[in-house]
Image (tube, rainbow, N blue to C red):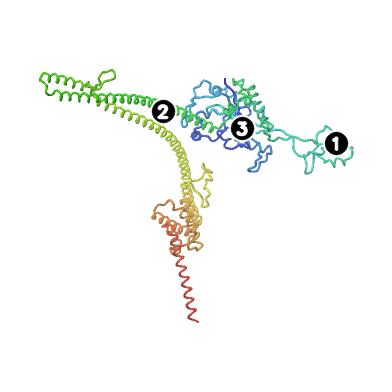
Amino acid sequence: MAKGVAHAGKDKDLSSGNALENERRGWDEDAYRRKNLKPTNNYDWSRHDLNFEVVDGRIVPLGSQETSLYQRYQNLLKELNFKEYKAGASNKQNTYVELILSGSTDRMQLLAFGDQKVDYERNPATWHNWHVRRMRDIEEWALDTYNFVCQRYGRESVIGFEVHLDETEPHAHVNIVPVAIKKQRGNVGGYVKVDADGNPVTYTRGKHVGEVIKLSKGKYDALPDEKKKDYRPAVRGTVKTISFAEHFGDTRMERSKKMSDLHDEYHRQVGSKWGLERGDVWKDLPEEERRKRRRHTKEEAYEEKRAREAKEKAVEEAKAAALMVEKQNATMEENAKTIEEQNATIDRQATTIKANETAMKKMTKASLFDRMFHSGLSADVRRAFEEKDEAHKEELHQATMATYSDGSPVKWEGGGQLTWQEWAEWLQKQRAKDKDKLAAEKAEAVDQATAAAKAEYGARLEKEMKKLKVGHDKEILELKNKHQKELLAFFPSGLPIKWTFGPKNGQQMTKDERIGYLDNLLGKYERKCNDSEGRLKLAKDLFMSTLDLNFLKAVLDILALAKAGAKALTNGLMEFLLMTMKAMDTLERRQKHVDRAFQYVRIFAAMEGLNYSENFLAPLREDAKRIADGTWDEYHQERADRTMENINQGKSIKRGKGRGLS
């Protein structure tokens, strides 16, 4: 069942940023793209013209009012004589309330777009809904909602009502300044003069014209009784003011009661009409359910979703890992059991082999004894013994061949029978293979665990790389803005040079535009008058506009030192020159920078009627060159040492002359 939704947020004031976003003022296609760089946003440029607002009961395009929402807020505060609190005050009152009214997403989308096909997928850089049109139902819902809030809080209190259809869920923002009529504060004692109908009488002349005639209690008591009947005791008047508590409650319990009443009345007057059930009663929900439903910011909701998905993924991975370990353990147990059975078989076979070897030794000894004992017998007897010996040898051969417990022979794959010794060696090799297989399975399990750890590290690395990319993009944007600023024209004082006429009136000039403008103006001067001083000033302005601000400041500072007769650069100018030469990576480029600076110093001096020779500028130039080649400190230390040496020599000569005279 579709339900209605109402959220309320209070604040000490309305920020200009929030006001601009509600009205979408100044939002072009690029602004929509920038907004969608945040993964929590889903603004659709192709639906921006479907947004609207309600003004005095009329549907108008969003942001079309002549006075902005922020200015309407400020104007109402002035009308109510609201006094601003001091910066950092802890007792500021709430002067702004924002209601966000909506409903279940499917129902609100149906009211806004009907059965039209709308692409709600997040498309940060593309737009697919130019064909969509706004339905009349959403406008009727907005008008009903507008009339409801005006009736509840007063039309004067509602300074803005914006409906956004360019996001996933259609919704309305209601901007409220809680205006209330309250009794005046302060002492209202005394007596007011009234006419025959009981209405207050005001002054008709003097400096208090228009004010109510009022007497203090002492002056009233001093009046004759017949005049006292023209006065009535003063009572408190009323005044419009801001009162959050009047509309939304003072205590937590009162605020909860007012919000519950808001939901009840909104459902009764608006929600039920548009198929929206009243939402669940907050106080009746268990605490766990309340925590789930508390309103979060987009960023908080996005982070919660990511954390939830990461947790679910980690649980699945843990289950898979546990299952894999369980399977590996089962396989290892099975292999261990097989190996144990094979070892038992080998032990049994070894026992059999040992018994057979003992029997073979006995038979061999018996055969040898018989041969030795009967060696002198006749040929027939000896033949009989030989036949017996051959049979004995066959018995010995049969005893060396391996058999299973049921007596069947143990054979190779090719068909030949194995001896007990060969079978024992084969079983020993099988045991070694099983051990190698078990070791390989363990190594494979370790490799899989290592791969899982590497995958987790790769995910963290990818996250860090994304953070670095965001920082890099921000740095690139700052460098781009800085580069853009370097293309603009500024006065030597640092103030921007702007157009004062034409289609670019008020915009800042670029350096190229400044040069063209001054060049054109200089040509007009040359054609129309002989004002050499004016032409010189324009030529100087044209010349200065071609220079970088930092380089120009360095040149003008050197010129100022030259005018003052200084023979050495100051530490401050030294640091500034070092800063201007920071990007110059070779000594040759820095020396050319110094030569160019002193060339411009002589040009500026000539423009001002001064003529500096190379020798006059030599000390300053020497200092600048020392700064360029990095020997400033060494150079000045040597000069200081020479000065001290000269001073010491002078003192020595003076002392020597004194002794000679004595």
Up-down: is 544 above or below 311? Answer: below
Marks 3 and 2: CB-CB under 8 Å? no
Mark 1 element type: loop
User: Counting residues from the N terminus, which is met first, the one under dot 2 or under dot 1?
Assistant: 1
Q: Residue furthest left?
A: 379
Mark 2 element type: helix
Tag in front: 2 or 1: 2
Side (left or right) of 261 relative to 300: right
Up-down: is 618 above or below 217? Answer: below
The answer to which of 430 and 455 lies nearer the viewer is 430
Numbered mark located on residue 230 in the image: 1
Residue at 49% in and 54% down: 553
Residue at 17% in and 23% down: 370
Which residue is labeled 3 in the image?
A: 9
Residue 97 image position (x, y, % from top left): 63, 33
Q: Residue furthest right?
A: 225
Residue 446 image position (x, y, % from top left): 38, 32
C-alpha gap between disc 3 and disc 1: 51 Å
- Disc 3 crowd rating (10 Å Cα; few below 14, some 14-19, many 20+) is few
Q: Quadrant of residue 164?
A: top right
Which residue is labeled 2 in the image?
A: 325
Residue 202 image position (x, y, % from top left): 79, 38
Q: Give the residue type at disc 1.
A: Asp
Side (left or right) of 205 relative to 47: right
- Where does the N terminus fall, quadrant-wise? top right
